[in-house]
Amino acid sequence: MKIVVIVKEVPDTEAKITINGGKPDLSGVKMIINPYDEYAVEEAIQQADKLGDSSVTVVMIGDDNSKKNLTNVLALGAEDAILVKDAALAGSDPLQLAKVLKAAIEPLGAGMVLAGRQGVDHDWGMTGIALAELLGWGHVGLITGLEISGDSFKATSDGDNGKMTFEGSLPAVFTTDKGINEPRYASLKGIMAAKKKTVAEKSLADLGLDAAVVGGAAAKVSFVGADLPPQKQPGRIIDGDSVQAKVATLVDALRNEAKVI
Amino acid sequence: MAKILIIAEQFKGQLRASAGELMAAAQQIGGDVDGAVFGPGAADAAGQLAGYGLGKVLAVDCGCEYSGDGFAAAVSDAVSAGGYEFVILMQTSFGRDLGARLAARLDAGWINDVIALEGSGSDVVASKPLYAGKVISKLKFNGSGLKVLSLRPRNFEAVQASGASAAVEQLGSGMQCKARCTTLEAKEAGFIDLKDADIIVSGGRGIGGAEGYEAIRNFANEIGAAMGASRAIVDAGWIDHSYQVGQTGKVVNPQLYIAAGISGAIQHLAGMQTSKVIVAINNNESAPIFKVADYGIVGDLFEVLPELGRQIKAARQ
């Protein structure tokens, strides 16, 4: 089975983000593979191993700087990669990106597509789900377990009311939650092998897409500004002669000052 | 005037109170409001939803607890034919999934996890946290097409139902769902979900090991709080990921957040810093968590938490 996994780059979760000219300033911020996508990659590789006679293709929308992170994903065990890069993509919304991904993925004849549940940058949580809709496939979001048997699947997900088990037929899209697996680290052998693997670069024209349908000018949603959240002022450390006394002062403050209990 | 559809949530026929938050956002945008509820029990919950003074309510039951493709397909014709400009959902496991699928199906704009709205009608501007709350962005929709929004729970002041009634339209029977929920293991009675909780108590490395979480559990049971965890103790395997608060876990917004033995890494703060009041308990007085806490106690959480539980309980009587 051909298994496709979608990855994207996001700012390092440890990074401090500043605002410049009403926009988040990412200059100098280290970009990493989206943490939720690491679970998707791991799941794709594990499923390919279990199914046998399968391979994993990684698809990313990025730029020239993305190749390093993409090679790191190949080092984990994916077979090859497609890097979609085109200056016209700047400012695209997640639905536009899903249309681009559809054009890149549809010709691959995949049995399933895996993606992280959301990018930890803009947290849209839409791209994988929108891709399923555009392909006419079913999807299960936020999966914490996946079993494939023939062309049917069973997937689990932590829902609002409890643990849900979903069933359906492949092809399908799954978006991975943390907890589904333990992502591996690249082995030295994997790192060496990745250098020989193919990264196919595709422009919008290569995918048969009109540049006018993507990018900020055609987006359905636009950013109009950004601010840092109001900083919480440090509060007070409660002193007291004993634990009982400190707690009594705290409970009094929570009840009479903050009025939250 | 815009036509607005609010997609409320229900479980076993009981409407969720977040319907009032959806109604508040709909009133901010302004327009004629209809409603929809999904899943087994939708018909019962539809009557309760009508009580918010809606034009009509769609009760959508495809015979399963959830199906992203099935639910979106079941309602999309009604959304198109109804001439709606806005669809509003909650940013829950249900709403984030259905909203994204429906927006893709109807080629609509999607702004999720909205914490505030300014202005009204088509020009409404939505505030949405980015980078797990390190930045608050402002977004607008372009064009006159359908706009789909999901609201972060507990950020809009809920409107109370007036007890009105409305016509209920049944949809979804016979729907072929491609990926459908076949079993649901409901949470145990009394379980308090992090996103609904007024009080949350979370544990970090300071609990010392998996068995140390018992102190968190005991406190939560004593005062009726939801339980959370830092990434460190989830990654260490001391507690399941579903408890994690922070950038790769849940974003929470309680009245009172108690961080016990949590140092306060930036990814954790991202998930809880909008809590109304933050209390930190840590034996390290230079822990960064004290910089965001309203009240701090430097001390041993295994002594402070049980005492705090006793005294809160006593204060309530």
Image (cartoon, coloured by chain):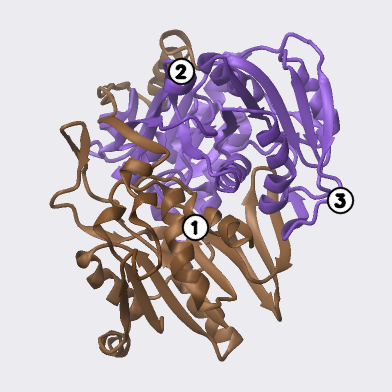
Chain colours: A brown, B purple
Q: Give the camera-side residue of B286 and B185.
A: B185
A97 left or right, relative to B107: left
Which amino acid is tagged 2? Val
Question: Mark 3: which secondary structure?
Answer: loop
- Residue B238 is tagged as 1
Cβ–Cβ under 8 Å for marks 1 and 3: no
Label 2 residue SS: helix
Question: What chain is tagged by disc 1?
Answer: B
| Image quadrant in which the N terminus of chain A is located | bottom right
Q: Which mark is residue A211?
A: none
* Residue A204 place in picture, x, y as percent: 34, 63
Please name the residue that numbered disc 3 is placed on: B174
Type of amino acid at the residue the image marks with label 3: Gly
- Spatial separation of the CA atoms under disc 2 and disc 1: 29 Å
Question: Is the residue A224 above or below the residue B181 in the image?
Answer: above
Left or right of B182? Residue A225 is left
